[in-house]
Image (cartoon, grey):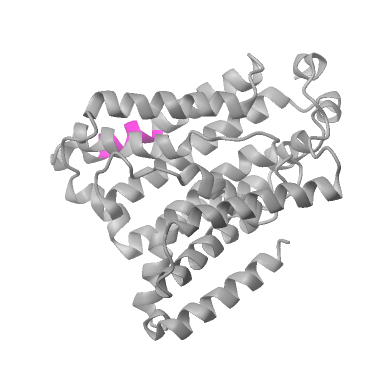
């Protein structure tokens, strides 16, 4: 599946170029990359969580929080840009750490943990803004998502960092954890620490995506709505097993590009944007079904106390 996804992506790009010849020009293709960059970054972060055998449903709400908080704190003040950027990255990591600690140490299933975090963050945004965010982003902040070269540079940095991390000892132990956490724990892998770090990486990726979306799309209380499902769809489209233990972060990012290309093609042919959710649902169900056929009971090793104790 790792290679197939890039074949599918190439076919979709050709179809887009046929429907819109401007896409072949550098400006047209870079505009596509800029639109896809936040989802690609979210997919990279989501990969670390999913390959470890968990889920993170909070990233969409976290993206919204990042944008709303940035606008409120900066409020057009250029001097506040860099301190707020640092705060946003720290906020993403903290939310990820909280998700990881609750999931691993308190043994609350990650689906429930991150669903709860999603609702808490969404409620906090609505309570703080009343549905109408206040403040404004500075020009220096907006250039990070609006400027094509900046967006491409950020994407390249994230892609290289994620790839190097997956090839490190940590990346290999994370895959081992998702494949069989008991065996990983018995072989000396710190399962709890590995998963907490994975959630922190997902939170940081959401922070970066939020910063880029704030620059690209502006301030909105719905800017991150649905992105958690798009990120998961992209990851499974890239061949990452939902039960963990199998997959490539490069393919996961390729899945994000493929999903964005598919939506772009549907839009060019005037097909309703509401179909995007249908497409994502079909992809997720098909991925789970395929995993169940290959490995009945795709969650290979239920969480047990001894595995946590060993970690």
Q: Nearer the viewer, residue 165 or 282?
A: 282
Q: Nearer the viewer, residue 120 or 25?
A: 120
Segment colored magenta: 82-89
On screen, residue 36 versus residue 176, left or right, reads left
Q: Quadrant of residue 148?
A: bottom left
Main secondary structure of the magenta stretch? helix
On screen, residue 261 versus residue 239, left or right, reads left
Q: Quadrant of residue 185?
A: top right
Q: Nearer the viewer, residue 139 or 221?
A: 221
Question: Where 11 sits versus 73, above or below?
Answer: below
| Total numbered circles | 0
Query: Residue 62, image x and y in percent?
Result: 41, 34
Q: Quadrant of the N terminus?
A: bottom right
Q: Does residue 300 belong to the magenta stretch? A: no
Query: Residue 238, image x and y in percent?
Result: 65, 57
Query: Residue 96, image x and y in percent?
Result: 51, 29
Residue that appears at 64% across and 15% down: 105
Residue that appears at 74% across and 42% down: 172
Residue that appears at 65% across and 65% down: 5
Residue 240 seen in the current view: no
Query: Residue 69, image x and y in percent?
Result: 27, 32
Q: Quadrant of the C terminus?
A: top right
Q: Quadrant of residue 90?
A: top left
Question: Where 148 sits versus 202, above or below?
Answer: below
Residue that appears at 50% across and 47% down: 42
């Amino acid at each position: 599946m790792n290679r197939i996804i890039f074949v599918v992506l190439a076919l979709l790009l050709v179809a887009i170029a046929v429907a819109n010849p401007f896409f072949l020009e550098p400006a047209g293709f870079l505009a596509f990359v800029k639109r896809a960059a936040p989802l690609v970054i979210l997919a990279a972060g989501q990969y670390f969580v999913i390959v470890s055998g968990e889920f993170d449903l909070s990233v969409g709400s976290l993206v919204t929080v990042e944008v709303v908080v940035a606008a409120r704190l900066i409020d057009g003040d250029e001097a506040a840009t860099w301190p707020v950027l640092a705060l946003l990255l720290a906020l993403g990591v903290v939310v990820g750490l909280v998700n990881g600690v609750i999931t691993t140490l308190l043994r609350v299933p990650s689906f429930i943990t991150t669903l709860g975090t999603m609702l808490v963050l969404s409620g906090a945004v609505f309570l703080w803004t009343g549905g109408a965010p206040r403040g404004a982003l500075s020009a220096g902040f907006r250039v990070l998502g609006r400027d094509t070269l900046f967006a491409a540079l950020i994407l390249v940095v994230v892609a290289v960092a994620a790839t190097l991390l997956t090839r490190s000892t940590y990346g290999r132990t994370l895959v081992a954890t998702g494949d069989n956490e008991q065996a990983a724990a018995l072989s000396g892998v710190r399962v709890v620490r590995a998963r907490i770090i994975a959630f922190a990486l997902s939170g940081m990726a959401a922070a970066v995506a939020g910063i880029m979306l704030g620059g690209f799309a502006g301030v909105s209380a719905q800017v991150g709505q649905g992105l958690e499902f798009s990120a998961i769809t992209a990851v499974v489209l890239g061949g990452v097993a939902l039960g963990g233990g199998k997959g490539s972060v490069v393919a996961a990012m390729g899945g994000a590009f493929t999903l964005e290309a598919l939506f772009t093609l549907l839009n060019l042919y005037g097909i309703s944007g509401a179909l995007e959710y249908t497409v994502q649902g079909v992809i997720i169900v098909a991925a789970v079904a395929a995993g169940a056929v290959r490995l009945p009971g795709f969650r290979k090793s239920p969480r047990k106390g001894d595995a946590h104790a060993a970690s």
